[in-house]
Image (cartoon, grey):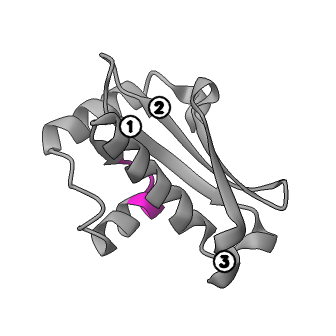
């Protein structure tokens, strides 16, 4: 897990991705979108780590940063990404649960964003 300390995470809001870099190389990505109306909840769609970088804590670092971003912005997170949802269950102190209504609305809005699948 010590290697994940060298991970830098950058938010590319325009492209709906949170990207982890290690040594200048992109090693993992979380696709997301911002729910309407603004400022809306941040919705995690999927998290992918390149196979050669798995097991270093990169996916967890991406999800943790995603929740930190949402907290800074004062908006909730809807973890539709299965990995992010499992992470949130394991870290309830860092990942407040989204309401059922918010989750349903996020799922409805995700259908409008086929590019994120």
Q: Nearer the viewer, residue 107 or 74?
A: 74
Residue 6 lies in the magenta stretch: no
User: Mark 3 or mark 2: which is in front?
Assistant: 3
Indicate whether 84 appears above or below 2. above
Question: Is the residue under label 1 in contact with that under label 2 (CB below 8 Å)?
Answer: yes
N-term mark: 3 or 2: 2
Identify residue for label 2. 33
Indicate whether 47 appears above or below 71. below
Instruction: Name the spot of residue 94 as percent of width and height, x first.
Output: 30, 63
Identify residue for label 3. 56
The alpha-carbon separation of the residues under discs 2 and 1 comes to 6 Å
Label 3 sits on a secondary structure element that is loop
Residue found at the very far right of the displayed protein: 24
Question: Is the residue under label 2 in contact with that under label 3 (CB below 8 Å)?
Answer: no
Question: Residue at the spot x=47%, y=31% of the render?
Answer: 33
Identify residue for label 1. 42
Indicate whether 8 appears above or below 32. below
Q: Residues within 10 Å of mark 1 (few under 14, many from 20)?
A: many
**Going by the image, does 110 lie left or right of 30?**
left
Q: Report the magenta residues as a range.
A: 79-84
The alpha-carbon separation of the residues under discs 3 and 2 comes to 25 Å
N-term mark: 1 or 3: 1
């Amino acid at each position: 897990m010590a290697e994940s300390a060298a991970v830098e995470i950058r938010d590319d809001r325009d492209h709906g991705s949170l990207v982890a870099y290690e040594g200048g190389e992109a090693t993992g990505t979380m696709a997301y979108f911002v729910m309407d109306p603004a400022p809306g909840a941040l919705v995690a769609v999927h998290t992918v780590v390149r196979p050669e970088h798995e097991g270093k804590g990169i996916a967890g670092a991406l999800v943790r940063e995603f929740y930190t971003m949402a907290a800074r912005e004062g908006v909730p997170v809807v973890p539709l990404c299965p990995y992010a949802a499992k992470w949130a269950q394991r870290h309830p102190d860092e990942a407040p649960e989204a309401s059922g209504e918010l989750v349903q609305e996020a799922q409805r809005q995700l259908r409008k964003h086929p590019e994120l699948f």
